[in-house]
Amino acid sequence: MLEVTELEKTYDTGDRALKSVSFEVSGNEIVAIIGPSGAGKSTLIRSINRLTEPTGGSITLDGKELTHLGQSELRNARRDMGMIFQEFNLVERLTVMENILSGRLGYLSTWDAFRRNFPPEDISRAREILSRVNLDGVENNRADELSGGQRQRVGIARAVIQRPKILLADEPTSALDPETSREVMNLLTDIAHEDDIPVIINIHEVDLAIEHADRIIGLSNGEVVFNGSADKLDEEARDEIYRGGESLEQKQIASSEAETNISDAVVERGD
Amino acid sequence: MAAEPGSTANGSWERPTAFYSKNVKYGIYALILLFFAYSFWNLRMSPARFIQGLGAGVELISSMLPPAYTPTQRELLIQGILESIVMAIVATVIGIIISIPVAIMASDNLVPGPIYYIGRSIVATTRSLHELIVAIVMVKAVGFGPLAGVLALAFKTIGFFAKLLAEEIEDIDHGQMEAVTAVGGNSIQRYIYGVLPQVMPRIVGLSIYRLDINLRHSTVVGIVGAGGIGITLLNSFDKYDYQFSMAIISVIVVIVMIGEGISAVARRRIQ
Amino acid sequence: MSSNPESWERFDRRERLIRFFMLFAGLVIIVAAWRAMEVNYGYAITAPVELADLFSRMYPPDVGYSTTITGALLETLNISILGTALAILMAIPVAFLGASNTTPNKSTYLFGKFIISFTRSVNVIIWALIFVVVFGPGALAGVLAIAVRSIGFTAKLIAEAIEEIDKGSVEAVTAVGASQLDVLIYGIVPQIKPAFISVTTLRWDINVRASTIIGFVGAGGIGVPLQTEINYFNWEAVLTILIAILGLVLVSEAVSAYLRKKVM
């Protein structure tokens, strides 16, 4: 379904955020992308729907090459990709119903968007999905009246109503407490299986990743250093991703050596 | 926006409105449209008159350009502008000095009830009358010339400054005043250490802002005889000497824009 | 900073010098300005007497006169509302040009900023003078003067509101494949609505005041009869008009404050 080939992103400052990233996603796989902060996870997922423009390489969704699309074709392609954001990114002052329906804006004329003339099928679907994410009854509440977990579920509903071919979730649980995070992850995996679409999830918590994902991609310093099923993610693999190859033990020895050096120096100065 | 239950039929949905009901909303819109229609009719404007006006406008602009002045006029222009600038400065200073006690009187957290009402009334009255009206009254009282203008602008400055300053004072953190009392300071020290540091940046910012406003107004109070370049401008219009008018207007615009630029820079440096 | 641990000063030597100079310079400017005005102190001393005399002539207000001015009062209100409405129409595109996140390129941004600055620099009376020459005396000139003058103020505040919106929401609407216009309608407009209404009512409030005096240069409203009565020394009538103006302004201020509170 999705093929990423030799993807590159170099910022104007010269910072190489993504180096030759390649992987594939198909069927209804749940793929988790893990890695330390600054590894390029967000840049990677945002490059897929070109919210961030890649500087090299290619991305193909269902056979269609994305990186060279013009503006209106890009818009059409984005309809097929549902994105879920860390900060939910709802339009706060609009109602829950309007936020969910906004997922269909790619199919609506501007005048209809202004008058909120959504087709009846969209409206019934919106209500179905609202039930599906366990948010019955709040359709006319303003988005800013909801809790964090509820808002993220609206965000998920907005992505689902697009009938996307793939879901892209950029750290969907980072702003939520552990229990709500679990609920959201379960929701995402359920949707992936029921609707038979793949999901790519950026995530911090490695345990959540192992629990829910079929496959794990480990990113370190802009490069893919691990790409395999969750059970293959052993201690060594984690070191590779998070500590650049050193084991935890080695790192602890190194840091305590450094501390000894400092205290020696202090004693010498005689303060 | 009030949360109103939308329609419950599955495929249709109405966007909730702040107006109690859709009918009320359309009723109010209709009234507004009616009002505008009435106002337009009142203006007695017809397409013919508008086109005539455009023609006259073009004629006026062509007779205004290029801006020009004779040597005598240049003297008048320079004198008038300088007088306006000076009036603005003096009026701002006097106005601010008087408004500080008034502001204290108008803050509900610093003074008892009756004094608060007196303070608030002073503020309300000085703010309600337009500076030109005040200028006319001042002209009748102290005669033609810049003194009337200065008094009028100072009068308006009091209203502006005292109101904003009072709001600032009402917002202060009482804890700081309490701390001074707790260490045994007297009431004046409470003000100096507890109130002043908190409101000082705002005072300086507001002063610069008001100076800028007074500069704008000082250029026109001359129209009613209160000094400054206003009277020169009015005379040039009455004499159909439009090139001189344009010269005066250009100078006013430049001076005001410079003033605004200085004011913006100064205020930013204080923050 | 002092290297002696036992002394502390709020400002070091250099800062003290600068503060002193600024204070000194400020005083010099003010004194020079005052002297330059060549104030005739004779007039200043008689001022309280003159004022008292004026007020005694104004009081009591000519109540019967109030019926003659209702038309002019209504016209003043009309001018303020129409002028503000017209201003909003023109200010919205200017605001989008003058906001760094919605303007197409640098030159349109500067152009927007220039229009904002220019319309704010020219006083409403000057605009009124110009429009009276172009369209003849009457309310039309007044409406246009008020409208043009208000563009700068309104556009500036709306542009600030546009620049403060949450970019995440806008990004999300873009990510579903919506067009630029859709993003505007669905993502930006709802976020600036409160600021928009607030700015509009605030400007209308100010415009009511302005509408009361543009009559002095012939642009309609209650300024016209006011000027006439002053010229004829009918002080009681003048007081009536002043009271009427005060009433109008207080009412409009109350309405404006109420509306602004409702959208918060």
Image (spheres, coloured by chain):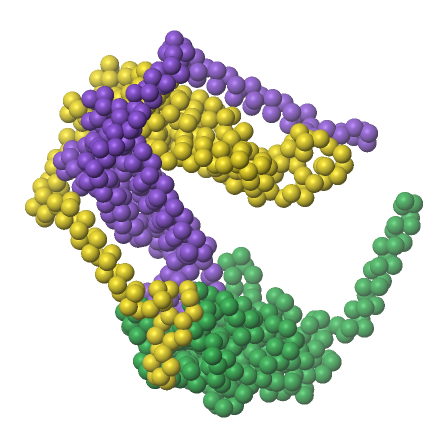
Chain colours: A green, B yellow, C purple
Q: Residue furthest left?
A: B48
Which quarter of the image is occupied by the C terminus of chain A?
top right
Q: Position of residue A23 (x, y in %)?
A: 54, 81
Q: Residue furthest top?
A: C42
Measuring 30% from the left and 50% from the top, which residue is drawn there?
C88
Q: Position of residue B56 (x, y in %)?
A: 12, 37
Question: Is residue C56 something that shows in the picture?
Answer: yes
Q: Position of residue C102 (x, y in %)?
A: 38, 56
Q: Nearer the viewer, residue A246 or C194?
A: C194
Give above or below for B69 relative to A222.
above
Q: Position of residue C95 (x, y in %)?
A: 35, 51
Measuring 65% from the left and 43% from the top, which residue is drawn there?
B174
The image quadrant that residue B7 belongs to is: bottom left
**Total number of numbered discs in the rendering:** 0
Q: Nearer the viewer, residue B210 or A64?
A: B210
Measuring 28% from the left and 31% from the top, which residue is drawn there?
C240
